[in-house]
Amino acid sequence: MTSPQDARGLMATDEGRILLAGMLLLAAYIGIVVFCGLFLPKIYELISAVTFSHIVIGRVPGITVAYAMKGSFATAVAINFVIETILVLFIYPLFIMSWNKLLDIGILKGWSARMHKNAEKYRPLIRRYGMIGLFAFVWFPFWMTGPIVGSIIGYLMGFRHRVTLAIVLSGTLIAIACWGWALKHLQTWAFSLDPRAPWIIVALMALLIMIGFIIRRLLQR
């Protein structure tokens, strides 16, 4: 286990400051959710539903739920981008600390090894194109080619933290905006056919993602 003195030392490193930024952003996000829960119940329901959908199922269902609950394009993009930014600011520094054995927490060891193995699969291809390759990797809407794995690949390629985070977060924002634009048009068309259609789309997307996850796990065995 890491002692309190070691923990304070870790927080003084670059990785520790990134983790601290993630903590502050998470605290601000929770504060907004609590404020909305007390004074703006409709917005609270929207943020809670989008957050739950994004964390449990993924980005696309999170955006789709935002539209199904009458959220705007800007709202859908903002909520999902903040969620993914928080995840990156937590997981990226924790991976580095654990991989370099600066953080001795048992549960992180196996997780770090799995994340490293997954990132290594894509690194040779991305290395060929450098920063543009990393940006494209984060932007393309393929399974497990998102900001978390992208940030780890950036670290393994030797990019500075600020470069990795700038590429990963900008790629993530553009990817979410593209999904938001496409899904907005899909939802508008579907709603013109049946008011229940947006929720049917949410259910179908969740089902497809779950099926894809199960197939992927079976193929890995």
Image (cartoon, rainbow, N blue to C red):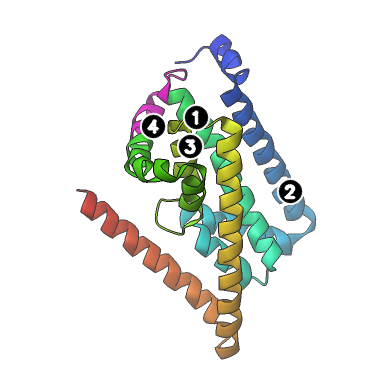
Mark 2 to mark 3 CA distance (whole Å): 31 Å
Q: Which residue is mark 4?
A: 112
Q: Which residue is mark 2?
A: 32
| Residue linked to disc 1 | 94
In the image, what residue type sits under mark 1? Leu
Residue visible at 52% across and 58% down in the picture? 59
Per the image, label 3 sits on a secondary structure element best described as: helix
User: What span is in magenta?
Assistant: 99-113
Q: How many marks?
A: 4
Which quarter of the image is occupied by the N terminus?
top left
The kind of residue tagged 3 is Gly
User: Mark 4 near mark 3, Cβ–Cβ under 8 Å?
Assistant: no
Tell me which label, 2 or 1, sits earlier in the chain.
Answer: 2
Estimate the spatial distance between the alpha carbons at disc 4 and disc 2, rounded to whole Å: 31 Å
Q: Position of residue 205 (x, y in %)?
A: 44, 69
Question: Mark 1 or mark 4: which comes first in sequence?
Answer: 1
Q: Which residue is mark 3?
A: 154
Number of residues whose C-alpha sits closer than 10 Å to that of mark 4, classed few (under 14), some (14–19) or many (20 or more): some
Give the left or right position of residue 153, taking residue 186 as reference.
left
- Mark with earlier residue (4, 2): 2
**Front residue (pair 49, 156):** 156
Q: CA distance from mark 2 to mark 1?
A: 25 Å
Looking at the image, tell me whether mark 1 or mark 3 is earlier in sequence order: 1
Decide which of tag 4 and tag 3 comes sooner along the chain. 4
Residue 70 magenta: no
Dominant secondary structure of the residues highlighted in magenta in the image: helix
